[in-house]
Amino acid sequence: MEFSSSIYGAIAFFLLFYYYLQWSKPKTNKEKAPPEAGGARPFTGHLHLMRGDSTTQLPHIKLAALADKYGPIFTIRLGVRRAVVVSSAELAKELFTTCDVAVSYRPQFRAAKHLSHDFATFGFAPYGAYWRQIRKLISVELLSTRRVELLSHVRVSEISQSITELYKLWDEKKDSSGKVLVDMKQWFGELTLNVVLKMETRRCRKVFREFFHLAGVFVPADALPYLGWLDLGGYEKRMKEIAKELDGIVGGWLAEHREKEYSGEDKPQDFMDVLLSTVRGSDFQVKYDNDTIIKSTCETLISSSVDTTTVMLVWALSLLLNHPHILKKVQKELDDQVGKNRQVTESDLNNLPYLHAIVKEALRLYPAAPLSGVRMFAEDTTLGNYQIPKGTWVLVNLWKIQRDPRIYSENPLEFIPERFLETHKNLDVKGSNFEFIPFGAGRRICPGLNFGQEMLHLALASLLQSFEFSTVADERVDMKETFGMTNSKATPLDVLAAPRLAPELY
């Protein structure tokens, strides 16, 4: 469709007028404001920094470079919005403790509106009574340590079945060297989806992959709201389409579980069964009906547990393949502690410190959400002796913090799991060690932390005990990242696999 010159002129005039109104408003005292990064463009400000079209241009990497120039806290302009970028453990601690209530709010992004049942999903819901009820539902009933333990049969069964299927694939398709080529990105994705809920994997994987991508898209209208009617890039149209398709999928699961419940069928419970019984007994005094709450919470489980876990399993195996001496060392630990006459179990995990160190080091170098989730100051606040006005967005660059040479002095960019057995052995992922917060911190910490940790360790241990892995022609794994809701590997993880246990153990 072509626009006439008069329409272009009207749009340009409107943009200029709106821009003038926004920037003619009284500003915070510049002496008390964080430094503003250079390179802002007319109208869009630093919006170009949020593009993620190549590895060298990924937002967390560009913002890390700006932190080296402007310091651990600085300001950027995203269209008409102002955002502060936090890049040090000290400021992250202040933000997630002293300022935590003030920054427990989320901006109302277009993606959140369209993909989360109008902000019903926990991760995007506004801070308030409903959010607190859902947090309690998730943290106490669904993903608490106790619940994760009670549902361990689902996790153990699915991991065991996936290992068996991988062995069958090897048995049927191994080449003359006794190895089979496997896309481990796909394998990990199917495994983690099935642990949360049994599903039509192929269709669901495609829909959820696009859901995760769109949820991380920075729509221009979020920064330039006066352009919302244009739907630049067609993102909002696609978000609505995916939301409708996803609603149908999750609605189908809900109907199946209700039918199982009504029939009295005696089967082991999964997360959806627990969710159904819990929501039925709760009083949510909000505008959402129970079905919407169930579907949105189910999507929270998948986004906070499945995608994050899949991403981290892919990065962990990729790092091990690029460091074969570390791969051999962790397999030796498994052989020494578990042996090769039985499969590893969850009770063995506490006896595998090197495996735990590998998982931590992978989380340090490749946090699933390198910029954490965007938050917004709900009131005027002081952070790092700077005045931050109400409405300012905040980005915490976990990728930068977790590679800080002041903290990780020994080759901070290198994969060295031993650091978590020696100099940093007391760090955990629960959000209280602010130099290492791969799951975030404060009230908005990732609700899938407990589930993710159990899945990461058991799945990785089972896989490494059961199979030998190598790359085609011993090439290094491509470690390019993509930009989205999670920090996914940009390319497939094609590996050669061969069993290392006796056939009867599969």
Image (cartoon, rainbow, N blue to C red):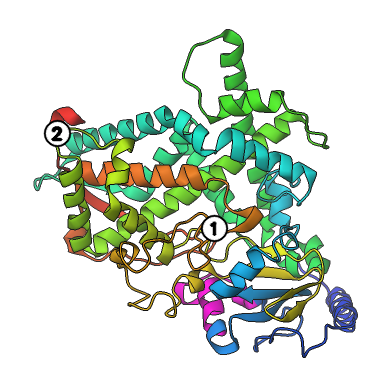
Q: Quadrant of the C terminus?
A: top left
Question: Quadrant of the rendered structure where residue 280 is?
Answer: top right
Place of residue 283 in the rendered image (x, y in percent of width and height, measured from the top left) = 78, 29
Comparing marks 1 and 2, which lies closer to the viewer? 1
Q: Quadrant of the N terminus?
A: bottom right
Image point (34%, 69%), residue name: 423
N-term mark: 1 or 2: 2
Instruction: Name the outermost residue toward the left.
Output: 176
- In this rendered view, identify the residue nearer to me: 127 or 211: 127
Specify the amino acid type for callout 2. Asn
Image point (80%, 70%), residue name: 3
Place of residue 262 in the rendered image (x, y in percent of width and height, measured from the top left) = 61, 11
* Magenta stretch in the rendered image: 48-66
Image point (16%, 51%), residue name: 332
Indicate the secondary structure of the residue bearing disc 2: loop
Note whether residue 276 is visible: yes
Q: Which residue is mark 2?
A: 341
